[in-house]
Amino acid sequence: MSKKIKFGVVAFPGSNCDEDCVYVLRDVIGCEVKKIWHKEPSVGDVDAVCLPGGFSYGDYLRTGAIARFSPVMKDVVRFANAGKPVIGICNGFQILLESGLLPGAMLRNRSLLFECRTVSLKVENTATVFTKKYSQGQVIRVPIAHGEGNYFAEPDTIKRLEDNRQVLVRYVDEKGAATDAANPNGSLKNIAGICNEKRNVFGLMPHPERASEKALGGTDGQNMFLSIVESLS
Amino acid sequence: MTQVQESPISPDVISKLGLTPGEYDRIKGVLKREPNINELGVFSVMYSEHCSYKNSRNVLKLFPKHGQRVLIGAGEENAGVIDIGDGWCVSFKIESHNHPSAIEPFQGAATGVGGILRDIFTMGARPVLVMNSLRFGSLDKPQNRHLMKGVVAGISHYGNCIGVPTIGGEVYFDECYEGNPLVNALALGIMRTKDIARGKATGVGNPVFYLGAATGRDGIGGASFASKEISEDSYKDRPAVQVGDPFMEKLLLEAVLELLQTDAVVGIQDMGAAGLTCSTCETASRGNSGIEIDVALVPQRETGMTPYEILLSESQERMLVIVKKGKEHVAKDIFEKWDLHAAEIGFVTDTGQMVVKENGKVVVDAPAKQLAEDAPLYIREEKRPAYLDALKPIRVSDLPPTGDLNAALLKILDSPTVASKEWIYHQYDHMVGTATVQLPGSDASVIRIKGTEKRIAMSVDCNATYCYLDPYEGGKIAVAESARNIVCSGATPLSVTDNLNFGNPMKPEVFWTFRKSIEGIRDACLKFDTPVSGGNVSFYNESPKGAIDPTPTIGIMGLLEGRDPVPSAFQKEGDVIILLGTTREELGGTEFLKVIHKLKDGIPPRLDLDEAAAFNKTLLEATAAGLVRSAHDLSEGGFAAALAECAMSDDRFRFGAAVTVKADGLSNEALFFGESQSRAILSCDPAKLAALEAVIKKHGLPHQVIGKVGGDKVKINDKIDVPVQVLRETWGNAIRRRMSA
């Protein structure tokens, strides 16, 4: 790597995984990190943008619905449309849906309960900047923590996502089967994360930053960040 | 409440505010005149048990409160502060929200979490963990399921949103909590020692800022409501329950911590119980100063609020900040960054008086120090309850036959008190912060402090059945068990916070159990060198059926440096299993007796403090030397339940175990399900067994090498033989099954 990759981590009022993402990107995988306050007009000179988890604006109205109007979001959309990598985790995924960068919407978990636990995911497509360091079909263990992660979209949208191989991670059992029992929230087709058609915007409900260190029980999530670094290097 | 404030002061009004005629005379003495209705309201909340500890202070004096590591002791500030070395310290405390949760479980529990978090971040510490201790009646009744569902959802809502991990706790079920559930919330924060903030108002002329949510009519008289019994009419007190907004609190938290990094703040205090009243008179009292505010300047979310309502409101997410004169712009910039509403409502004086005006007209003028610190102090009558005289040791020969021991074990694992609490903690974000290095489900939960080698272990515990049967032993055991949890994780216990939940202190029997429990806690804390650095007293926990069992919940904070925590569950096939400690014929007060024989009776286990101290030393030395792969303390359900938990409680793998344990004249019931104290199941690498046995012998506790980890069944002495899968399904689904009924 000739120059350090620079990530921008956007903090909205109510974000609460922003510092966790900063920690992994800066202290664990050694990137440069710029924390971007939501009132800033531009993301600045970063190479990739991360929208972290949390409860932006208290999740009032609808998850992510108010954050998309934050001043910085206009520039995040510009950044994404320019083909630069944007990853949205949990609430960050919800904000990407609300801002139209990704299709679909989130419903409440079918249990109607918040679910925080480690689940198994299958990496469905490794031909993206977010997943290139995984092997095709690899089953990884990554925690979830959400009350509204039940992914929903119109049947033709789902078909398009599947046909274009935009579903990057799916909830599966330990053996890699996308069973109903392995679906923690009721998402259609066990969808845990999707990318846009250009494959530079990725949203997922699980938290890769919580599975990037041995001390936390596993490092399966780290390759999502390392894939971005490798792609940009 | 509106009726009270509009009526002239009469004996009826005085009594409605929870004041006695003697207390009214005391107020007249302090003011040297008759109080007006606002002043009476202010005194009534400051004289409530919740704020003044008037019935308990005399007994709380028994606690050891000092120690080398205690930087701020119990009662000095919003929360105690403990030194953990290298310029770091922690602030932690537990507090009850029992009555609000009984009436409005979701908001009651949510605001309990919000309140304890504010206590921590006003000390300048960043909250890094929340835990809780919950008690409900039987889950077989829909009203108790309703309460638990609401309480868990409330804690989950608040903690998850604000982004502080709820890393575990304890939950017990007993009929005595029917109608009066217990909801105790604990929070812990970390900070650099140089950053400790104080709740004092000093510097004449320094401006007083009100920060955060606007004041409404919610929670008026909450402190007084908490200081009386719950009755059939308590639903009328629903307006005394506050409504929480964790998003607002997240903004407050960030703004306050940012503000405290500047040099603009003189003192800060949250508006918790008794709201604006308590925060103004306490900050002035601690600063040996006076304070003057105008309620007309207080942001209000409802129109037509009277000074009385504004002073007594317990609206949530509000802070009082005393700013250095000339630095107002520094504070205002930060408030603006976080889109927080702030208002300058007054200033510090040198009169020693708490003066409240409404548009310039004086509505309260009372001496701050006497208001904050000179509440009446009572010595309550005590009487040993008669039921204690009838208790005898439980002999198996007096009980009906237990029958199949496999079935008995499964029944005990299906008891919600013993069963897995994952239905609860899966609703809590216990991983946010990426610091939780030992997840809920082990004896102690552990978080790391990033950038250091330090880890904090935390445990809360209390077996109230023991306290009911013997409050002194029960108090001792609450401390000892919590400490056992900490040392099993490899951490050194440093300090205690306690939540003393009892019935009506005017009942001599209740007060006797209160004192005895505290004596037990004192003796254990002295033995373990774990001073009490804070806590909370919650009296009047009575439903129409009577008082709850004495429930002195103990939270212990421990420190672990440079090592990974030790989990409770077995980690590797082929490891050797050891039973540490002495098993006695002790079945009184056990879960076995409750679940299998429907009895809450007998003499509960005895705790020998020397044995407990030797246990702690053994675990600390063995874990420090890396000799132990897993350690799980024995508690409710005894040896058999603990062995089953070692086999199945780690989500990543399941191990069986085949063991033979010597009986030495004990009944099978006592051997498998008795709850003798100071015991644990350890597992270790066979290559390290000799070294581990040497450490155990050095400290003098007996032990047995009982078998090996492996297989897919739990087998004990050819008497118990159950597949791990069956144990796991029973234990794992016991609460979920009942909650989806």
Image (cartoon, coloured by chain):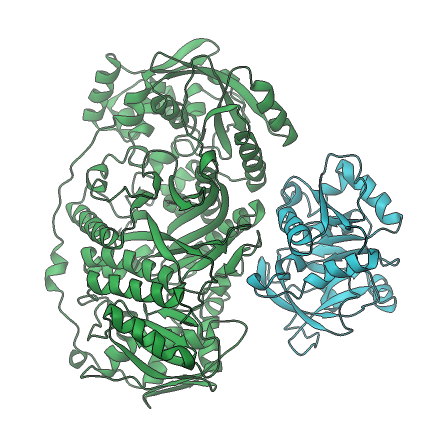
Chain colours: A cyan, B green
Left or right of residue B685, residue B452 in this image: right
Image x and y of residue B97, in percent: 39, 44
The percent position of residue B449, horizontal first and vertical second, equals 51, 50
Residue B570, percent across and down?
Answer: 45, 75
Q: Which residue is depicted at the point 53% across and 71% down?
A: B651
Total labels drawn: 0
Point 50% across, 61% down: residue: B439
Q: Is B733 on the left or on the right of A204, as rendered?
A: left
Q: Is B428 positioned to the left or the right of B12 in the image?
A: right
Quarter of the image where one finds residue B375: top left
The residue lying toward the viewer, choosing from B540 and B82, is B82
Q: Position of residue B653 (x, y in %)?
A: 53, 76
- Towards the viewer: B292 or B177: B292
Considering depth in this image, is B355 or B99 the residue closer to the camera?
B355
Q: Is residue B174 visible?
A: no
State whether residue B604 is above or below residue B103: below
Instruction: Let me know if residue A46 appears in the view.
Output: yes
Query: Splitting the image into 4 quarters, where does residue B41 fall?
Result: top left
Residue at the bottom extreme of this rendering: B718
Quadrant location of the N terminus of chain B in the rendered image:
top left
